[in-house]
């Protein structure tokens, strides 16, 4: 896979020694999603592209880096991890990695941030999308969405009994617990306001006063959070401390017919215990994330007809991808003129991402 530099004049300005070098490392499909007007882009810099379509090799990736010696890298889902040896070279010229999507852990090692290289991603757009999807999953679980087709396919004279048997519930006035109180949880708090729910939250290290500022009552423990709420939304960051924190005992303490939603990470939860409760009909479960992803075709989850499952699609929707590209382009321009960039990724952010 070669590095392309013979782009139209508006994209690849004449080479000047003082010009910074920008390397776009995206597939053709990703370029179309995020930068549909790429050929008209003018940044006042040398713009190069390493096409990641067709799964280029690690050797081709390193050759591209050594050839271009970029000051700015623009990365996406298909970009290879930056080699540790490249990151640690004493004369590294890279100053900024503009990652288009969310988690950067699949692209950069922690050592790059430790060196002081700036990194950004799609920022709060992801939190808004995840919170929106969490609300969708809550409503789907309460309204028994997995049973809808069965009702519609039933003989007309049986549909009334079918609808009654669904035992649909409203979100209005419910008690809702949030495990985690980052950006996703805080956006979800706002989205839930019209439903007049009673909110509580638990997240180790988050001050109680901060939760109360957002109209949320802090729970004294994770056990209390799960036991006292009819709906619990998992939106905690995954760390060594939070992994497997939602144990079988905590799940077993949930109210009968409670709703559990996970839009965070599958590894936070004892999935076997969760599946047992869902299979028994003890609680309603709605998931966008799983311990193993992509979800295997023979996964037991796919055999549970009464569980709401989505294919890890929380986050910015497809119609927002161009906005993500616009944010990236604006950040590149800011970096080139020495202005602060938006949606930066800190070491803490890196550690909480997966």
Image: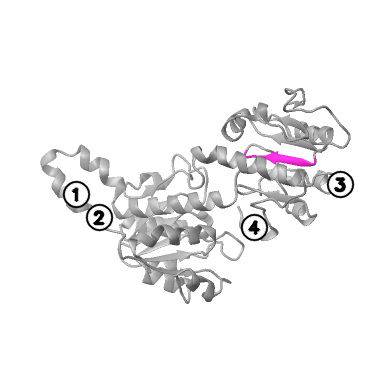
Residue 348's disc is none
Q: Earlier in the sequence, mark 3 or mark 2?
A: 3
**Is the Cβ of the residue at disc 3 closer than 8 Å to that at disc 2?**
no
Disc 2 is placed on an element classified as: loop
Residue 163's disc is 1
Q: Counting other residues with Cα less than 10 Å from the Cα at mark 4, is it few (<14), some (14-19), or many (20 or more)?
A: few
Disc 3 is placed on an element classified as: loop
- Residue appearing at x 52%, y 54% in the figure: 265
- Start-end of magenta stretch: 71-77
The image position of residue 346, as x and y in percent, is: 69, 57
Which residue is disc 2 drawn over?
A: 168
Which residue is disc 3 drawn over?
A: 89
Q: Earlier in the sequence, mark 4 or mark 2?
A: 2
Q: Earlier in the sequence, mark 3 or mark 4?
A: 3
Q: Earlier in the sequence, mark 1 or mark 3?
A: 3
Which residue is disc 4 drawn over?
A: 349
Q: Is residue 107 visible?
A: no
Q: Counting other residues with Cα less than 10 Å from the Cα at mark 3, is it few (<14), some (14-19), or many (20 or more)?
A: few
Q: Counting other residues with Cα less than 10 Å from the Cα at mark 2, is it few (<14), some (14-19), or many (20 or more)?
A: some
**Is the Cβ of the residue at disc 1 closer than 8 Å to that at disc 2?**
yes
Q: Counting other residues with Cα less than 10 Å from the Cα at mark 1, is it few (<14), some (14-19), or many (20 or more)?
A: some
Magenta stretch containing residue 195, yes or no? no
- Residue appearing at x 51%, y 42% in the figure: 294
């Amino acid at each position: 896979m070669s590095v392309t530099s013979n782009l139209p004049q508006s994209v690849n300005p004449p080479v000047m020694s003082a010009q910074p070098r920008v390397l776009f490392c995206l597939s053709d499909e990703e370029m179309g999603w995020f930068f549909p007007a790429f050929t008209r882009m003018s940044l006042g810099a040398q713009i190069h592209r390493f096409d990641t379509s067709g799964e280029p090799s690690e050797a081709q990736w390193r050759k591209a880096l050594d050839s271009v010696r970029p000051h700015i890298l623009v990365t996406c889902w298909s970009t290879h991890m930056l080699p540790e040896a490249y990151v640690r070279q004493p004369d590294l010229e890279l100053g900024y990695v503009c990652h288009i999507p969310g988690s950067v852990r699949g692209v950069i090692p922690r050592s790059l941030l430790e060196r002081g290289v700036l990194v950004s991603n799609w920022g709060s757009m992801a939190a808004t999308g995840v919170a929106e999807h969490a609300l969708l999953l809550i409503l789907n679980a309460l309204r028994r969405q997995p049973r809808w087709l069965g009702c519609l396919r039933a003989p007309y004279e049986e549909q009334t009994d079918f609808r009654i048997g669904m035992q649909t519930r409203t979100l209005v006035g419910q008690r809702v617990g949030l495990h985690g109180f980052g950006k996703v949880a805080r956006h979800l708090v706002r989205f839930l306001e019209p439903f007049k729910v009673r909110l509580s939250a638990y997240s180790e290290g988050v001050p109680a006063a901060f939760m109360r500022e957002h109209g949320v009552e802090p729970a004294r423990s994770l056990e209390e959070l799960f036991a006292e709420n009819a709906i619990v939304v998992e939106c905690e960051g995954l760390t060594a401390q939070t992994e497997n924190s939602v144990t079988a005992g905590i799940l077993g303490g949930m109210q009968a017919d409670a709703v559990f939603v996970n839009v965070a990470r599958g590894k936070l939860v004892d999935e076997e215990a969760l599946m047992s409760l869902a299979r028994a009909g003890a609680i309603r479960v709605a998931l966008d994330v799983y311990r193993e992803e992509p979800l295997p075709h023979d996964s037991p989850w796919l055999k549970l007809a009464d569980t709401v499952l989505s294919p890890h699609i929380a986050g910015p929707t497809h119609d927002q991808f161009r906005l993500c590209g616009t944010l990236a382009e604006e950040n590149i321009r800011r970096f080139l003129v020495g202005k602060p960039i938006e949606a930066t990724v800190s070491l803490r952010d890196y550690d909480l991402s997966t």
